[in-house]
Amino acid sequence: MRKKSSIILGVCLLAISMVLGACSNSDNSSSDGSKEITVWAMGEEGKKLSELSKKFEEEHPDIKVNVQAIPWENAHDKLLTAVASQKGPDIVQLGTTWVPEFADAGALLDLSPHLEDYPEFKPDNYFEGAAESMTFNDEVIGVPWYVETRVLYYRTDLLKEAGYEEPPATWDELKEAATTLSDRGDDYYGLDIDQNDQITPFIFAWQNGYEIDAENNNLNFDSPEFREAMNYYHSYFEEGISQTTEGVDMVQAFKDGVKPMFFSGPWMINILNDQAPDLEGKWDVAVMPEKETNKSSIGGSNLSIFHNSENVDESLEFLSYMNEVETQLEWLEISNTLPSRVKAWEDPALSENKMLATFGEQLENTKAAPQLKEFEKIAQELLASIERINVGGADLDKELDDFSKKANEIIED
Amino acid sequence: MKGILKSVSQAKHGLMFIAPAVLILFVFSIVPIIIAFFISFTDLNLKGLADWSNISFIGFENYVELFSDELFHKSIYNTIFYVLIGVPLVIFFSLGIALLLNYGTSKLFTVFRAVYYMPSITNIIAVAVVWGYLYNTEYGLFNYLLSLLSADKIPWLTDPTIAKLSLIILAVWKGIGINMIIFLAALQGIPQSYYEAAKIDGANRFQTLFYVTIPLLRYATFFVTVTTLIGWMQFFEEPFVMTDGGPLDGTISIALFIYKNGFQFSEFGYAAAGSFILFIFIIVTTLVQFKVRKSDTEY
C-alpha cells in the first residue's frame, strides 16, 4: 500500500515539474555552440520579423534568432511579468510611450558603453523626436527602430466640390473647410477626431506652442496655450463638425464621404488601399495645419536589450543590423513601417513616393510624447476629462483645472 | 497527539483524495490573498517589482486614497447596479428555462438544452465581436430592427446608463447556461413520489410548482444565488471587452478598476488595496446570505 501511494506521489511531482518546466525558458545556447537570442516583437511586426531575421542569421551563422510574436493587447502584461520574474527576452520591441516606464524600472540595459563600437546607434542618425526616446535619466536605453507620425488624410474630390483646391494649411482654414463640409447635411461631418487616441490632444497643444517644462517638472497644463488648444479641439465637437459618438467605421465613413478628413498614421495608407480600392486617386495626405507650428507627434517602436540578457554582444549585433539603412529599407518593403534613419529617406523608395514623402516632410517637424513614466496615466486622465467635456457637457475650464491639478499630483507621487 | 495520528491514518485515503484540491486552493487562492493583503500596505509599482528594495511600507495610505477616489466610488456604484439587476434576472431566467426544459424529454428539449448552454462556453472575445455589431448605434442589428418599428436609435453602448443595461443583458445571456444545468440536475433529483402525492391531494400545476418543486430546489437555489452573486460582484469580462469602462466611466466595475490600476498603470499596491476591499465586500455578502438563509426544514 505504501508503495502505491509513493508511486502516486511520484507521478504527481513529475507532472507538476513538467508543467512548471514548460513555463520556464529553455536553455539558450544550442548544442552546436552557436548562441540563440530571443526577440519579442509586437503585433504585425512580430509576424513579419522572421523574414528579416533569417537574413541576419545568414550573415551571422553563429547566432540564431528566435522571434516571438506578441499581440499588442497582451504585450504590456507580458512585459510586466517579464520584469517581475526577471525572465525576459534578449531584445524587446517597445512602443515609444512605454519606454520611460520600463526604463524607470531598470528593465532595459544601458547601451552607452557600446555607443562607440556601433556607429549605427548615434542619435544624430535619427529624427530628432525619435532620438529623444533613446535616453532616459542620462542612460541610452534603446534605439529607434521605425517611426510613425500623424498627418491629415482628406478626400481631394470632396474638398474640391466644396471649393478647396488645396488641403487646409492653417487652423483657421481647417476649421473653415471642416465647417463647410459638415454643412452638407445632417449626417455629415467635417473632420474626424479619434477621442480615444492619447496623442491627438497633445498634437493640438504643441501646435499652439504648448511645451512641458521637463526640467522643473512642470507640466504646464494650466498654461493659456494648452487651454486655448483644448478650446479649439472642443469646438469641433461643440459645433457638430466632429462626431461625438463612435459612429460608423472610419474607412467606411471616409469611403461614403461622411467624414472627409481625419488624422492618422502611415498604416492607414495600406488600409485605405485594401479596403477602399475604388477611392484611389480621390484622397491624399497633407502635413498638419499650422497654428504657431505644424508639429505632429512622433511615435513608433524602439528596440531595447533586456537588462539581464546573457547575450549582450549578439543582441547588439542584431540591433546594429536592424538599424542599418539598407535593412531599414528592406523592412519598409516587408512591413510598410517608416524607417527611423533620416538617411533612409533619401532613397527613391521614399522620396519619390508622394504620399510617403509627405510623411517624411512631417517627420522633420515632430515631437515625441513626454518622457514621463506616468504618461499613460496622465493621458488617460486627459482623455477622460475631454470625454466629460465633449460628451458629458462638463464645463471646459473647470474640468481642465481639475485635470491640471490631478496631473501634478500624479507626477509628484 | 496519538489520537490525531490515528485519525489521520484512518482517514488517509480521504485526505489523499482532497489533497490536490486543497493544494491548488492553497497555492492559487490563499497564498495570493495573503500576499495581496501585504502588498496593499505598500507602494509596489513596476520599479518595486523589478527590484524589491524599492518597495516601501506606507500604511493605510492606499486605502485612504481609495476612499477619496471618485472613480472608485463610481465603480462601486456601477457594481451594485450590475448585481442588483443582473443577479435576480439570472436566477429567474435560469430557473424558468430549467423548469420549461424539464417538462419534456424529446429530442427537441435536448437541442434546446444545448442552445441555452452554448453562450456560457463561447469565447468572450467572439461574444464581444458579435455583440459589438448587434449593439452598434449606426448599423447594429438591434437598431435596425427598431428602425423597422420606426423607433428611435438607442445608444446601446454610448450612454452611461443604457450601456450598463446593455452589458447586463449580455451577461445574463451568457450566465444562464451554467445555472440552468444546476437547476435541471436538481429538478431531476426530486423523487417522483412527491408529485404523485400532490396529484392525489388534488394540487394543480401552480400549486405543485410553488409548494413542491421550488421548496425542494432550495439547495440548488441557494448555491446558485451565492455563486452568481460572487461572480457578479467580480463583474469584469463584459465591460473589459465591450466598453473598457466607458462611456464617461459609466460601465467601470470594481474588478475592472483594479485591473486598470494594476496592469495598465502598474500601481500594484493601490490595486491590491482595491481588491482587498472587494474581497471584504464579497465575504460580507456571502456571510449575510448564510445568516439569513432559513433554517432547514426537513420534508
Image (cartoon, rainbow, N blue to C red):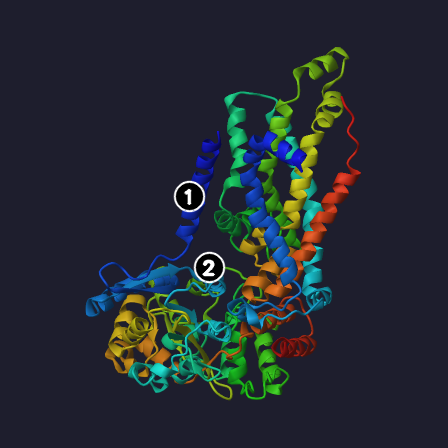
The answer for how far apart the CA atoms under marks 1 and 2 are is 30 Å
- Chain ID of residue with mark 1: A
Question: For this view, does A330 lie left or right of residue A262?
Answer: left
Please give the name of the residue rendered at 49% of the width and 48% of the height, measured from the top-left corner.
B130
- Please say whether residue A213 is visible from this viewpoint: yes
Quadrant holding the C terminus of chain B: top right
x and y percent of residue B248 in the render?
Answer: 64, 63
For the residue carrying disc 1, how many other residues have a C-alpha within 10 Å: few (<14), some (14-19), or many (20+)?
few
Secondary structure, mark 2, is helix
Q: Quadrant of the N terminus of chain B?
A: top right
Q: Disc 2 marks which amino acid?
A: Asn
Q: Nearer the viewer, residue A108 or A179?
A: A108
Look at label 1 and name its amino acid. Leu
Please give the label number shown on residue A74.
2
Residue A14: mark: 1
Q: Is residue B126 left or right of residue A142?
A: right
The image shows residue B127 at horizontal and vertical percentages of 51, 47
